[in-house]
Amino acid sequence: FTVTANPGKRLSLNGSGIINNSGVLQNLVATTTPEGVSGVISFINSATAGSQSVFTADGSTADQAFAGRVQFFGTSSAADGAFIVEGSQPNSRALPAVWRNFMTNQRLPMASSTISPADLVGA
């Protein structure tokens, strides 16, 4: 199944975060609009991204627009989650809005991450 943080909405994960014992992959997606209104997935306090969970931050489709965002606060961790940051238009805010959140938190050893090449334009 897929859980979506629609544009202008926030999905906050607190407590333990995601624990998936179902054997079925869970997909969580932060979407965006051409106008740059983004959905946000936030890990708060000590929440972790458990195994069998894939997080996707949709890339922006317009110049100077925000992409979907995944954020970590407190002692939260990417743990065993897999993260996909989709490519965005040049000059968009994909890297500042998404990748910076991975880089500034030292508790983010991830099972895997995929950064589309378009995200690195102008970096």
Image (tube, helix red, strand yellow):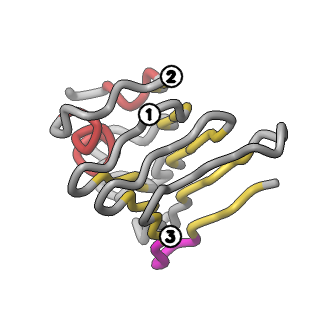
Is residue 2 rendered magenta in the image? Answer: no
Image mark for residue 11: 3
Name which residue type carries label 2: Ala
**Three-letter code for the amino acid on which mark 1 is drawn:** Ala
Residue 59, image x, y percentages: 49, 46
- Label 3 or label 2, whichever comes before in sequence order: 3
| CB within 8 Å, label 1 to label 3 | no
Q: Which of the numbered marks, if any, corresponds to residue 79?
A: 1
Relative to residue 74, is residue 99 depicted above or below? above
Numbered tag placed on residue 111 in the rendering? 2
Q: Is residue 18 left or right of residue 26?
A: left
Q: Is residue 9 above or below residue 45?
A: below
The image quarter containing residue 54 is: top right
Horizontal arrangement in the rendering, residue 10 relative to residue 26 (left or right) = left
Frontmost residue, 110 versus 16: 16
Secondary structure beneath disc 3? strand
What's the amino acid at mark 3?
A: Leu
Q: Residue at x 77, y 40 (%)?
A: 25
Q: Which of marks 1 and 2 precedes in the sequence?
A: 1
The Cα–Cα distance between marks 3 and 2, rounded to whole angstroms, is 21 Å
- Residue 99: give its label: none
Is there any visible trace of residue 28 in the rendered image? Answer: yes
Q: Which stretch did the figure color magenta?
A: 6-10
Crowding near pointer 1: few (<14 within 10 Å), some, many (20+)?
some
Report x, y in % for residue 113.
Answer: 48, 25
